Amino acid sequence: MPGRLAEVLTVSAVASVITVAMASAVLRAPSERIFGIDIVGRHHDPFTVMQQFERPISIGIYSQPVTDITGALLSRVSGPVAAYNWLILFTFPLAAATAYLLARHLALSRPAATVAALAFLPAFQVALYLALWVAAAFAVVEWKRFAAGLALLGFTQSAGLLLLQTLAIHAGLTAHVRDVRGWAVAGPILIFAAVVTSARTPR
């Protein structure tokens, strides 16, 4: 158990570093910005949640105690906008930790479980990659190539987000949500195509 706890803490720490890198612009002013692409004017949900954080803590039929109570307590200390950001960003290392535990429970090795945990961060891209692999390449791609593609997907996701943050901070360039969505779809497809092509290429 102590060994497993150390593994989870290590994965969580790595995921936290990636999260800090992805959200560096927000962390510079957590009470003035919110994490996400083009949320303002598109979705009211984040702002509704922030308003709820400012209300007295109560439990009702529609309550989500883990997020509602935690967010309300954070709001008392840092304000509703920052509380919303902290709550969202905390889910990234938490998701990586739980994905790692699931992978180890399924008897994956430590390296493979680590890859699974970190690749779990870009959930949409991973889901698309998995769907493509299951639908078309299960019979032709061995699991090692699949895992390598998954790791590459996680790396390119992190690198892409770092690039977007750098451009936003230093060059004042903000990617339109349409471009980000296009990249989110193109990334898994391109890596999937590369993995399948590599597997079919005769040596």
Image (spheres, rainbow, N blue to C red):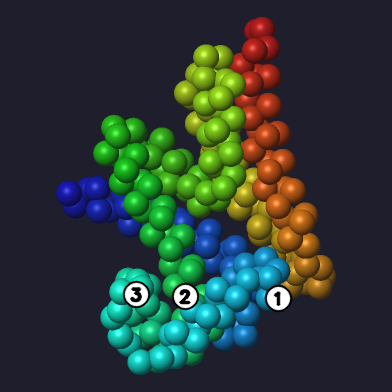
Determine whether 179 is above or below 29 in the image.
Answer: above
Quadrant in the picture for residue 22? bottom right
Disc 2 or 1, which lies upstream in sequence?
A: 1
Within-10-Å neighbours for mark 1: few <14, some 14–19, many 20+: few
Residue in the foreground of this view, choosing between 54 and 26: 54
Within-10-Å neighbours for mark 3: few <14, some 14–19, many 20+: few
| Alpha carbon separation for disc pair 2 and 1 | 21 Å
The residue located at (70%, 75%) in the rendering is 41
The type of residue carrying mark 3 is Ser
Left or right side of 120 for 191: right
Quadrant in the picture for residue 171? bottom right
Determine whether 75 is above or below 174 in the image.
Answer: below
Look at mark 1 in the image and give the residue it sits on: 41
* Element type at mark 3: loop
The type of residue carrying mark 1 is Gly
Query: Could you tell me how many numbered marks the image carries?
Result: 3
Label 3–label 2 contact, CB within 8 A: no
The residue located at (34%, 75%) in the rendering is 63
| Alpha carbon separation for disc pair 3 and 2 | 19 Å
Look at mark 2 in the image and give the residue it sits on: 86
The type of residue carrying mark 2 is Trp
Left or right side of 161 for 102: left
Look at mark 3 in the image and give the residue it sits on: 63
